[in-house]
Amino acid sequence: MSRFIARRFVSMVPLLLLVSVMAFSLVLLLPGDPALAILGEERANADNKSAYYALRAEMGLDDPIPLQYLNWVGRALRGDLGMSIRNKTPIAETLGSRILPTAELAILAAIISVLIAFPAGIISALRPNSLADAGATLAALGGVAVPHFFLGILLIYAFAVWLRVLPPSGYVAPWENLGDNLRLMLLPAFTVGTGLAAILMRQIRSALIEVLNQEYIMTARSKGLGERAVVIGHALKNASIPVITIMGQQVGTLIGGAVVTETIFSIPGMGRLIVESISFRDFPVVQAAVLLLALSVLMANLATDIMYGFLDPRIRHD
């Protein structure tokens, strides 16, 4: 197993290099000049040209692009992500305070999606072409088709404005008040988790139907095992392997959904930080945030591969 994990780590190296190049290229692709953003165009254009050129040299913007990239990667590996142009604070501190709400939102959304997808998928697989199967399929299509921003607004109107049972927006850290935190995060997590639940439900249904027709399942039934023991004890474990793969692949979608959802529900996470930083042309923060999110997706995919190897030993020897 250790060799399998080591191979997966090594296979990630080219992806890590590609992600770092893409994150660094953001500063080159976005319009505007970081030095001008710090000094302000009026100050740089009036009688402060020397300060402008001095700042460009200090930031390394006059260096060749490959050298700029190597310097940036070297600082990032030492934990130095630079300073925010807008707040004049270390970017690492800013990201540290923003990553928790986004991580919490993604984890809660994943939990909600699993709680919805597994019961619905199992019922659909055990009763194919029934009314329950048709209803679950229709709900899954709706979950995939409805965009996050529209579903979020609908949920705010239904549960906050009309029924008045949940707050419409805001964020309280879990260590300050866990009850308020969960009440505030329920609607955003449901908004993000709905799409994933729909995808997982369809995957569970198709995988379980295929497994239930295998010979070893028929053998288990012929030995007199109850249907619950057959489904949960034998079929569901094998049917869960492709589902875990899908979940790992959907981590990027969860984070992408969080970017929009955080803005709708006023959650101070990475999504809102990126939107605000783009508005203020705070390029180093955008660069670091994109790098951190991309690394999070890669780590989640690595964890999925390792879990896949635990569940199916044949994968370790491929």
Image (cartoon, rainbow, N blue to C red):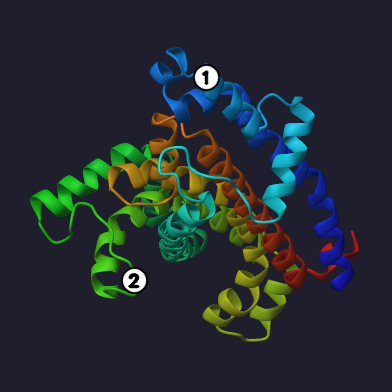
Where residue 56 sits, quadrant-wise, is top right
Gap in angstroms between the C-alphas marked 1 and 2: 38 Å
Residue 10 shows up from this direction: yes
Above or below residue 69? Residue 11 is below
Pointer 2 residue: 174
Measured as percent of width and height from the top left, residue 186 is found at 30, 61
Residue 203 left/right relative to 181? right
Above or below residue 229? Residue 5 is above
**Dot label at residue 31:** 1
Question: In which quadrant is the C terminus drawn?
Answer: bottom right
Where residue 274 sits, quadrant-wise, is top left
At 52% from the left edge and 33% from the top edge, which residue is drawn?
Answer: 283
Q: For the residue labelled by badge 2, is the local secondary structure a helix, a strand or a loop?
A: loop
User: In the orientation shown, which residue stands out farthest toward the top?
Assistant: 46
Residue 134 shows up from this direction: no
Measured as percent of width and height from the top left, residue 206 is found at 59, 53
User: In the orientation shown, which residue stands out farthest toward the bottom?
Assistant: 224
Is disc 1 surrounded by few (<14), some (14 to 19) or many (20+) residues within 10 Å?
A: few
> Which of these two is toward me, 37 or 101?
37
Question: In which quadrant is the N terminus drawn?
Answer: bottom right
**Dot label at residue 122:** none
Q: For the residue labelled by badge 1, is the local secondary structure a helix, a strand or a loop?
A: loop
Residue 228 left/right relative to 170? right
Between tags 1 and 2, which lies in front? 1
At 63% from the left edge and 58% from the top edge, which residue is drawn?
Answer: 300
> Which of these two is toward me, 177 or 54?
54
Q: Are marks 1 and 2 in contact (CB under 8 Å)?
A: no
Kind of residue sitting beneath label 1: Pro
Kind of residue sitting beneath label 2: Pro
Where residue 290 sits, quadrant-wise, is top right
Residue 182 left/right relative to 300? left
At 34% from the left edge and 75% from the top edge, which residue is drawn?
Answer: 175
